[in-house]
Amino acid sequence: MKKLSVIGVIMILFSLVLTGCNGTNKESSDENNQEAETVNIAISDEPKAEQLDATTYNSSMAIYSAVYEPLVEYDEKGAFKPGLAASWEISEDGKKYIFYLNEKVKFSDGSPVDAEAVKFTIERAKFNNEMSSLQLLSNLEKIEVIDEQTIELTFTEISNQILAELCQTRPLRIMSPHSVEEEKVSGKFIEAIGSGAFMIKESSAEHVLMIPNPYYNDENPVNYQINFKMIEDGSSRTLALKSGEADIIGGTLGAVTDSDIGSFESDTEYNVVEFEGTMSHFLAFNPDNQELNTTLRNVIELAIDKASLSDKELVGLFRENVQYVSEVNQKAVTYDIEKAMSILESEGYAKNKAGYYEKDHQELSFDLVIQTTEFPEWKQQAELLENDLKKAGIKINITILDREGYYDALWKTKEYDLIFYRTYTDALLPYNFLNSLYHNTEEEHGVLANDEVLSQLLDEFGQVIDEQQKQQIADKLFKRISDETLAIPIDYKDEKFVVSDKISEFSYSGLSDSPIDYKNLMVK
């Protein structure tokens, strides 16, 4: 009996050693995750992790980059650098792209990130976004797998935005075919399987807990887990950080006001981190409102004291670090309330007893729509703008909508005269932003403009390869926006975050919509 007991002990010990050596063993992995520090990240909207299909727009923008990686990335200065694609080639005519994949990368289920997975992702993105204006989807003619690590994309026409579109947070980050039923392009989504730093462990309407992907970074995973928490109100996000409920707040994840951020600057328990951004916040106009013509839009800009809205010098829609912006293709409009009123009077407007201008018994009164869930500072800026325009004899009625109602007004109902909005992350390369919002189609005018000249310039820009030609067209594009007052800047936004002392190092990814560099995030 004694001999058997020793053998039994040896076998048990041997078994334990084998289990400990198996880095991908589920039980071992679960134990490690239970010991891993949890980083709580406040986000402004419901995560909807059960719908985190890389090729759709169904989940919170904030959580895509935790699970999925792009073929191409931006570097700190907005140039392209390798992502899942180690390198690429572009044909001289701009119609063919060949991508050579990093052969070491695996998805979180251990399967390879290969050419077939890339082909599957792009075909699924095209299937799920039939009306997309993205060149990669709308101009795609065929996809050919050359070998396991090489894929070739051919387009029907010059497509000069492919690399920029691949950098975006969605809908072209690469997902495993195992994520859907029967690995079919049209298959029902089952689970999020990507090559990013994390995989989903549990989720609800209020949060999503993600644990390290054991195959990430050539099987050198991060040593912490993350918990995205939905906290809709900006002030509540600030309180969550102070109470320890959150460890990271700010940026597009869940913005907080500058005054709230300032309250942390002298507190050693927190670290305020700031990075130069590329995003602009601006005032836009409903193109269906015929009264808001070029002259009246210009009057409104003249009557707004931009110095009270931002500590930046606001020159045009795009800030100076955005590609193709120059000192001459955007013009600064100086605050001049007397000139604004003089123009109105020359147009036949006269002030009524209430102090507002009117013509033909029609008072100059406009509805301004904003939301404060994502951008809490908009309330104060809207009130400052309302006061400025009141001095100029223009009445502004502010309507604050919830997030869903706001986007319904912008994209669907069009129930606004004026609206605050923001440029996209890919404002580094502003064509996609302008094309999605200012370009007229055969069916309808643009979301924020009805300008055929601007639409024609956008078409021309999308068809050239030569950088000098691009700059020449961009000069005309930006000048047209300025001359026609199709957008009035109200702020240039830097990326500001506040983190708890649990975070010893916080790095910005360079992309506003997926701002955290998880590989370089250091947790105490």
Image (spheres, grey):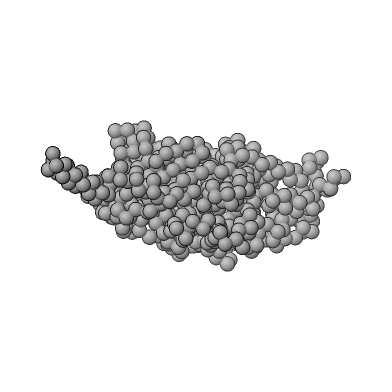
Instruction: Tell me what residue is drawn at x 64 percent, y 51 percent.
Output: 377
Instruction: State the image coordinates of residue 345 (x, y, percent, origin top left).
Output: 80, 52
Q: Residue furthest right?
A: 353
**Number of numbered discs on residues:** 0
Residue 188 visible in this rendered orientation of the protein: yes
Residue 121: x and y, percent?
Answer: 34, 43
Q: Is residue 134 left or right of residue 319?
A: left
Could you say where residue 358 lies in the image, as x and y percent from the top left? 80, 44
Instruction: Examine the rendered structure and indicate whether residue 517 appears above or below residue 184.
Output: below
Look at the picture and state if 361 lies above or below 257.
above
Quadrant of the snapshot with the C terminus: bottom left
Relative image position of residue 339 (x, y in whole percent): 77, 59
Q: Nearer the viewer, residue 260 or 293?
A: 260
- The answer to whether residue 125 is visible is no
Q: Residue at x 34, y 38 (%)?
A: 179
Q: Residue furthest front?
A: 2
- Quadrant of image for the N terminus: top left
Q: Nearer the viewer, residue 60 or 426?
A: 60
Q: Is residue 483 left or right of residue 105?
A: right
Q: Residue at x 30, y 36 (%)?
A: 183
Front position in the image: 221 or 69: 221
